[in-house]
Image: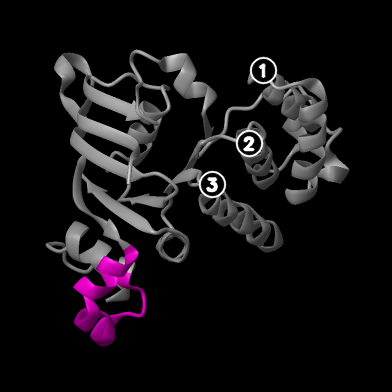
Amino acid sequence: MQGAIVTENLIKTFGFSNRIQAVDGLNLMVPESSFFGFVGPNGAGKTTTVKMLTGLLSPTSGRIKILGMDFAKHTVEVKRRIGIVLDRPALYEQLTGEEYLYFSGRMYGMPKDLVKDRMEELFQLMDLADDRRRYVYEYSAGMKKKLALAAALIHDARILFLDEPFEGIDALSLRAIRNVLNRMTATGRTIFLTSHILEIVERLCSEVAIINQGKIVFTGSTHQIRERIQQKIEEESSHPLETLFVQLVAKDEEEKSLSWLR
């Protein structure tokens, strides 16, 4: 199976004299048509990795290949084929929802009629049809997240990057969005998901990588996770990904509490 996303010794450092190493030698292979989960504790390097994979940050060193193309050499071609929803979407809030989605489609070079047709479907899917002519600054946080997701879907991206995409989204919309995402992978698209909600990752994803302190500490299928810790699951938890996550990321930490609750 060919890799939709491949990284080779990817490094990102910040600060004076590169003192903070956010991503440390990341080697990753995301198969095509997979629903890939990328999880880790706060500050582990998840969002930094997503920003490098989408061209929002330049790596300090290392190589990124997207759909077989070297990102550094084919930046525009790669960006035409991907969609992204960030944890905190940056939208043009002085536009209406309708104007923003139309602008997004045209920016990808889509014909006007095709943009309009897909807008209708996306507004219905996201339950934003009644709010399409409101200004984006009037939207709630959940509505903004749904509009950002609609903009990422409109051009039929080959790879969709989702950084904490489900926070603030109501249950009915979430169910419809999950169905669409599963349909995308079934028809050859690839999804790269980061989320703190391990139950969602476990339910949706076929492959999972765990990052801690900028390094990959586990990568494999959800089936392999269940096999690896089957005994532990029976003893402690009904959620195998959560059990493995704690074992790998917080294995040396004592249980935390508050002094007045002991």
Seen from this angle, which residue lies furthest bottom?
235
Q: In this view, does 17 lie to the left or right of 181?
A: left
Whether residue 9 is visible: yes
Q: In this view, does 78 lie above or below 127?
A: above
Would you say the residues marked 1 and 3 are in contact, meaning their CB atoms lie under 8 Å apart?
A: no
Q: Give the range drawn in magenta.
A: 222-240
Nearest the eye: 170 or 79: 79
Seen from this angle, which residue lies furthest front?
1
* Residue indicated by mark 3: 165
Mark in the foreground, 1 or 3: 1
Q: Residue at x 68, y 58 (%)?
A: 176
Q: Is mark 3 on a helix, strand or loop?
A: loop
Question: Looking at numbered disc 3 in the image, what kind of residue is underneath it?
Answer: Pro
* Residue indicated by mark 1: 109
Characterize the local packing of mark 3: few (<14), some (14-19) or many (20 or more) Cα atoms within 10 angstroms. Answer: many
Question: Looking at numbered disc 1 in the image, what kind of residue is underneath it?
Answer: Gly
